[in-house]
């Protein structure tokens, strides 16, 4: 099994990203949304590959001293091997070197695994946005101060 390689997401990656998105989230982003994120300004979008295959991605946006992680997912068969940790570390390094002071994200209230992952990275739950998701579930906003 080859090493995990991170790179910036490119238009040719969107099919694979979207497949992972549909496998990973109950209300996945539409494919076109990823296309738009790739051309929007102030974005930091990464993919992780092993042996050329996309096994994870992170989509984030940044404005002045704040960064927002919009999406992170890892192929179910590749979880608990530190791949999301690598993606987030790269994002945090970028944030630090660009003067970002706070990284924030929303996570479903029921998504205990992801909340544990963010706690592992020293994110803290800050507040709850009721009915944030289309199916009515609340989001926990978690933030990390750099
Ligand atoms: C959340 C997610 C991105 C984590 O990816 P991952 O590559 O498995 O995470 P890592 O291996 O880097 O985890 C690092 C540490 O975080 C914690 N962690 C990660 N996933 C966890 C889980 N499901 N339950 C408890 N702790 C978890 C552990 O401390 C882990 O270290 P360990 O495996 O040595 O115990 C992945 O489970 C996923 O894609 N989930 C579906 C999509 C999703 O929910 N995304 C987040 C939406 S807000």
Image: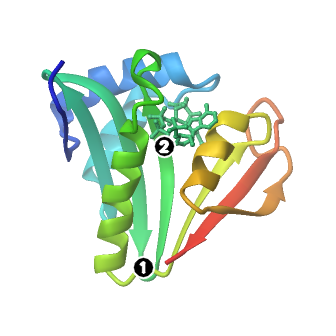
Quadrant in the picture for the N terminus? top left
Q: Residue at x 38, y 32 (%)?
A: 32
Pointer 2 residue Cβ closer than 8 Å to ligand 1: yes
Q: Residue at x 42, y 15 (%)?
A: 77
Instruction: Give me the residue at 66% from left, 35% from top.
Output: 113
Instruction: From this view, report whether residue 62 is shown above or below residue 31.
Output: below
Colour mapping used in the image: rainbow
> In the image, which disc is placed on residue 71?
2
Q: Is residue 135 above or below residue 72?
A: above
x, y percent for residue 13: 22, 29
In the picture, the disc for residue 85 is none
Label 2: how many residues lie within 10 Å, few (<14), some (14-19) or many (20+)? some
For this rendering, which residue is in front, 63 or 89?
89
Residue at disc 1, CB closer than 8 Å to ligand 1: no
Q: Is residue 13 left or right of residue 138?
A: left
At x 78% / y 29%, what residue is drawn? 135
In this rendering, position of residue 6 left or right of residue 79: left
Q: Position of residue 109 (x, y in %)?
A: 79, 41
Q: How many marks?
A: 2
Front-most of residues 38 and 126: 126
Q: Quadrant for residue 112, please give it.
A: top right
Task: Give me the C-alpha separation between circle 1 and circle 2.
Answer: 18 Å
Circle 1 residue: 100
Q: Secondary structure at mark 2?
A: strand
Between disc 1 and disc 2, whose residue precedes? 2
- Report the image quarter containing ligand 1: top right
Q: Are marks 1 and 2 in contact (CB under 8 Å)?
A: no
Looking at the picture, does residue 64 appear above or below residue 104?
below
* Residue 88, x across and y down, in percent: 40, 53
Q: Quadrant of residue 105?
A: bottom right
Q: Residues within 10 Å of mark 1 (few under 14, many from 20)?
A: some
Which element carries disc 1, helix, strand or loop? loop
């Amino acid at each position: 099994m080859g090493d995990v390689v991170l790179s910036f997401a490119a238009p040719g990656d969107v099919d694979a990203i979207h497949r992972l998105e549909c496998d990973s989230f109950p209300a996945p982003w539409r494919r076109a949304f990823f296309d738009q994120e790739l051309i929007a300004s102030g974005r930091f979008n990464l993919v992780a590959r092993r042996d050329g295959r996309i096994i994870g991605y992170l989509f984030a946006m940044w404005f002045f001293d704040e960064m927002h992680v919009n999406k992170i997912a890892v192929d179910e068969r590749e979880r608990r091997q530190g791949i999301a940790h690598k993606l987030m570390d790269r994002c945090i390094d970028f944030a630090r070197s660009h003067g970002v002071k706070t990284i924030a994200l929303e996570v479903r209230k029921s998504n205990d695994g992801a909340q544990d992952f963010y706690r592992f990275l020293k994110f803290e739950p800050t507040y709850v946005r009721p009915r944030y998701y289309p199916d009515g579930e609340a989001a926990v906003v978690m933030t990390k101060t750099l």
